[in-house]
Image (spheres, helix red, strand yellow):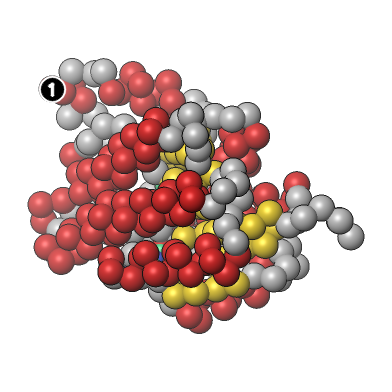
Amino acid sequence: MSTRAAQSLLLIGGTSEIGLSIVRRLARDAPVRPYLLGRDAAALERARAALGGEAAGVDVDLLDARALDTHAETIGRAFERRGGFDVVVLAVGVLGAQRGLDADSGEALAVMEVNFVGCGSLLLEAMRRLRAQGRPGTMLVLSSVAAERPRAGNAIYGAAKTGLDALAQGLADATAASGPRVLVVRPGFVKTRMTEGLPAAPFATTPEAVAEATVRALGAGRQTVWVPSGLRAIFTLLRHLPRPLYRRLPL
Ligand SMILES: NC(=O)c1ccc[n+]([C@@H]2O[C@H](COP(=O)([O-])OP(=O)(O)OC[C@H]3O[C@@H](n4cnc5c(N)ncnc54)[C@H](OP(=O)(O)O)[C@@H]3O)[C@@H](O)[C@H]2O)c1
């Protein structure tokens, strides 16, 4: 058994397939002690049980990304119980509202509320706590390639992710000299329950591949990681295409 002190991890979105894959991948390198935050007690218990063999002393607590007035207290409680975290992973997100203007209005608002306002609030709370904890800490933010440029087929989710990604980059620059460190993760299409039933996009990948790339990027001190890595060049090109051409692409 390892004698190294366990890394304390906070997973916001404690049932996320990508988030849990990152926890498992980190646990391969060193002991980890995860703290899972989520809105469904039974699902959190299943996640805790599933991590049983790979992580000891898993804590869970309830959190709804849309209940903005609870964020400071819930994130604060997690930091106080653990005396801070080495790594915080923000993996909350909903896809929904894929029909754009024709999407149900409530669903469209929920996508924006969860992915930008809710996640933005959680990011701010976690960053404040990491900065105040008196020891180094890293914030991992699950953004998306969708944040790189809005597209017709994904306007609502893309806009919300663009907002979150921009907030994470700005906070990263604001804290570059003092910490906490921020790593923005931009996956393409990942085969998880979020994308279940959708036709796989080109370069579709897995939660395990996202976790592998994320942990490597952490070790290399990177600020952004694209998964798979080739999407960086593709999206840089797409970003600069003239709009009349861009809007005709089957994206
Ligand atoms: N899958 C992809 O293709 C893909 C690609 C790029 C980026 N991402 C991003 O990666 C992150 C993780 O996604 P995933 O693929 O792992 O999907 P997932 O398994 O569905 O994870 C999404 C997480 O968000 C949580 N969540 C949703 N609404 C919430 C709310 N109101 N309050 C609290 N938690 C809430 C879910 O909790 P419940 O279990 O309670 O629903 C779940 O833990 C997301 O930010 C997603 O946008 C995913």
Q: Against 55, is 143 above or below? A: above
Outermost residue, bottom direction? 42
Q: Which residue is mark 1?
A: 244
Image quadrant of ligand 1 equals bottom left
What residue do we see at 63% from left, 29% from top?
A: 220
In front of the other: 81 or 190: 81
Q: Against 195, is 67 above or below? A: below
In-image side of 238 versus 223 (left or right): left
When asked about the image quadrant of residue 35, the answer is bottom right
Task: Look at label 1 and name its amino acid.
Answer: Pro
Could you say whether the residue bearing mark 1 is in a helix, strand or loop?
helix
What residue do we see at 58% from left, 55% from top?
A: 85
Quadrant (top left/top right/bottom left/bottom right) for the C terminus: top left
Q: Position of residue 66 (x, y in %)?
A: 28, 66
In-image side of 104 versus 38 (left or right): left
Q: Against 45, is 126 above or below? A: above
Q: Position of residue 229 (x, y in %)?
A: 52, 29
When asked about the image quadrant of residue 219, the answer is top right
In front of the other: 199 or 95: 95
**Residue 219 visible in image:** yes
Q: Position of residue 224 (x, y in %)?
A: 47, 32
In-image side of 218 versus 111 (left or right): right
What residue do we see at 60% from left, 65% from top?
A: 82
Q: Position of residue 249 (x, y in %)?
A: 24, 29
